[in-house]
Each structure stands twice: as C-alpha cells, then as structure tokens.
Amino acid sequence: MGKKFFAAAFLMIFLAMPPQTGADTSPPARPQDFAHFAPINGSIVKGSLYRTELPEEVLRKCASDCGDLRIFDQDGLEIPYVIIENRMPRSKTEAYNAEIISYKESDASAELILKLPEKFNPVNRLVINTTDRDFSKKLVLYGSHDMKKWDLLADAAIYDFSSRVSLRKTDVLFDKSDCRYLKMRIEDDGAFSKIDKALLLKYDGLDLSVITVQQRKLRIGRIEARSEFEGDTATVYDEAVLKTFTVQLDKDRNTVVEFESKMPFYKIFFDIANQYYFRKATIKHSDTGDKNSFKIIGTESIYRFPLYRLVETKNYVERQVFKAGSYRIEIENKNNPPPDIREIKLSWIRKRLYFVALDNARGLALYVGGSKATKPDYDLPRFINQDNWFKHDFQEALVDVSQIKENPDFKSERSVFGKAWFETKVFSFIVVLLVVGLGYWLYALSKKWGAKETP
C-alpha cells in the first residue's frame, strides 16, 4: 500500500507542475508565431537608423501594447526596434507681464495698447486676469513693432457663464509673434441680440440668453503674454471613422451610444447636427461587452453654441488613454431634443517604429498578432526614446499596408513541452524524489526506534 501511495504521489506532483514561462526558458520568437505580416519597403543599409509609421491597419491587428509585433529579415533573424509616440516634449512656458501704456474706451468698447519687456521670446497666448462673471465679449488683437503698422493676430471671443454652467474662457491663442506692442480691442458680443427670441439658447442645464449675459465693461486686473505649446500643438494624432456604432434612447430619454474598439485611443469625436447643445456625457467601458459589466470611467461635457461670429464647440471626450474594448456613452438629454449624431471618430497619438539595420538587408517584414508573443526587451530603447527621438538622424521606411497578409505558417498554439520544459520537469522530479525519499527514510527510522522502545 505504501509503495503504491508514494508512486501515485510522485506522478501527481510531476504532472501538476506548471510549464515554465519565465524569460529564461521561453524560446525566441519566430515568424510562424505571428498571424499577419506586411513587407517593409526601402533600401536597408547596415548600421542605419530607420523610421516607419504604424498605421491603423497594423495597430488593429496587434495587442494594445504592441507586444506581439516583430521585425524579421528573409532569413528569420529578429531585428530589435522601439515604438515611440509622435509627440515632442513640452517646452517650458515663459510668461511676460504686458504693461498697459494706453487705454481708450467708449460706451460699447475699450482699446488697450500693451508693451512687452525689452527681451522676450515670441508669444502665442494672451491671458486676461479678471474676476468678472457672466459676460461675453469680442476681442480683436493686433501686433506691431513700432506702433505704426498693426497686423491682425487674433479675432476671438472671451466669455464666462459660470453662474449657470462651468464655461469660462479668458485667453486668446494665436500664431507665435515677436511683436513687442499689442493692441487689444474689446467689444460687447452682439451675437445673442441677433438670435431669434424664440431660440433664446435656453435648454435645461444651458442658459446663455441675452437676458442673463450682462453687457457691461470688463474689469481687467492683469494681462499676461505667454510663449507655450497649446494643447496638442506638440502632438500629432491619427484618427479613424467608426464604421459600426449604435445610437438609441433609454427609458429616461438619454442617448446611449455603443461601439467596440480593438485598439487604445485618446479621444472620441461626435459629429452632431444640432445647432446648439450642452450635454453631460458619461463614458463607460467593458472588457467583455456583457450588459452588466460596464463601469464608469469618466464624465465630461460636450457643447456647441454661437459667440460673436464664432461657434464655440467641444464635441469630444478624452482621457489619457482609452483601453481597447466595448464602450457605452450615455448623453443626458433632459427635456432637450436628442443629439443627431451623424458620425463618430476615434483619435490616437501617431505611433512610429524605429529600428537599426543589422545588415544590408532585403526582405524585411513586420509581423503582428502573435497569440502567445510577449513584449520584447531590447537594448535600443535605452538609446532612442520619447525624450530624444527628434535628435537622431534617420531614414524613412514604409510598411506596405496594401500587402498585409495572413501568415500561412502561423501556429496559434506553440507547444510548451520543449527541451526547456522537459529539463525543468526532470530537475523538479529529482528534487521531489529526494525530499519524499528522505521523508520516508525518517518515517521508517522513527518506527524502528519506536518499536525498540516498546516494553
């Protein structure tokens, strides 16, 4: 009985030991481990740095972190690479106090001339410091080097509706200018007075009517000129139109939008036909798409309304990153007409792949979609990374997306029962055998001594 028990124990322990998946035992990647491939076109010279874009067609076929992506030459040699987002590090913002050297006013407008310090870098933003609330003004900005010839820099609107909704804008963005003198003309925004009184821009949650926006002089505390990047100026985005999405009303008349994405993204844009709107949008995500598996990941406002001759619009929601998966956007309508959503776009930061040719190679190809592939650990990211990619000289290569094909040699399941697995099993079996054998010897010894001590 004892021998049968120990034999069965050895066998169970041996089979229960999981295969080793650590980096020390995992075999190197092979072309047949990936589901799709596309040729990389270009003259490849040994030791040269190359860059190629990763288009949507490639990103949709690989994992969220692009871990299942490899480059192989015609002999199956793996070429190290690094993937970098197309964004520049933000430069330090420099701010300059704009001295008011002239001021004129009338009943409906005010004109200020500003002077920047003697030494300054070109500026691209003007920030007005005011504590006023509930206003809407037209602002026209000019620049000059000598206060004789004035060039138009910006024609925009500044406003505040914070007593009713969280909307405030007291800055103006323009192309970088090295003009030391700025002329700023502020006028009452006449846009609302021209709106049909039957359309007084008054929806539940949005009241921007001419009655509540007070036409009064703006009290200005300080004006600051800045040299900085604005939002996405230093970032290049790619986008794609969603081909499939659903729009319906729930029992509370909220608009519910649902779609799936196979790749991460940063923004969701809505093309809405309504003339004006202000809605709260709740974003929910699910890994599986099951009805009860959606979780709230954020809430934002989307809006569109006229100001001066412009239309102020925020028709998107954004996060640092939206994961791949299923999405549900719930737009709160209250008593307003539902938004007429004509189109939805997803936007993400453009990704670029850099690699150094190991030889004068031909027949390079990009392989993607390996079910068992893990993210590689190369040396190249130590030298070329997000902080210095723009300092390197490189040549362009091109992933020919028109030639993306299924890999006929693809094996979806790579056997783990290879040499490394077998060696690990043998070693583990020997260790277990020694431990159990030692334990059995101690057990037998204790029985023997126990028998001798029995009177």
Image (tube, rainbow, N blue to C red):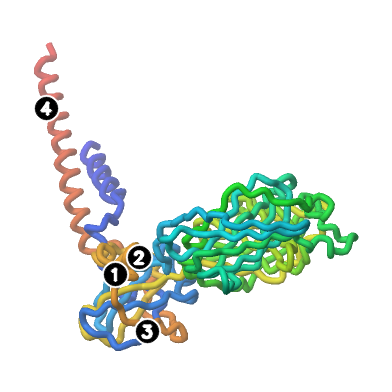
Q: Earlier in the sequence, mark 2 or mark 1?
A: 1
Which residue carries the number 1 mark? 29
Toward the viewer: 254 or 15? 254
Q: Is there CB contact under 8 Å for labels 3 and 1?
A: no
> Residue type at mark 2?
Ala
Separation of marks 4 and 1 at Cα, in angstroms: 52 Å
Query: Mark 1: which secondary structure?
Result: loop
Secondary structure category for the residue under label 4: helix
Where residue 48 sits, quadrant-wise, is bottom left
Q: Is residue 227 left or right of residue 112?
A: left
Q: Is residue 94 above or below residue 63?
A: above
Label 3 vs label 1: CA separation?
A: 18 Å
Q: Identify the mark nearer the N-term, 4 or 1.
A: 1
Which numbered mark, 2 or 3, is in the foreground of this view?
3
Callout 4 amino acid: Leu
Task: Look at 62% across and 62% down and name the residue there.
Answer: 184
In this view, the mark in front (3 or 1)? 3
Counting other residues with Cα less than 10 Å from the Cα at mark 1, is it few (<14), some (14-19), or many (20 or more)? many
Instruction: Identify the mark nearer the N-term, 2 or 3.
Output: 3
* Quarter occupied by the N terminus: top left
Neighbours of disc 2 within 10 Å: few (<14), some (14-19), many (20+): many
Q: Earlier in the sequence, mark 3 or mark 1?
A: 1
Q: Nearer the viewer, mark 3 or mark 4?
A: 3
Q: Is residue 240 left or right of residue 156?
A: left
Q: Which mark's residue is nearer the viewer, 2 or 4? A: 2
Where is mark 4, residue-wise? Answer: 445
Residue at the disc numbered 3: 39
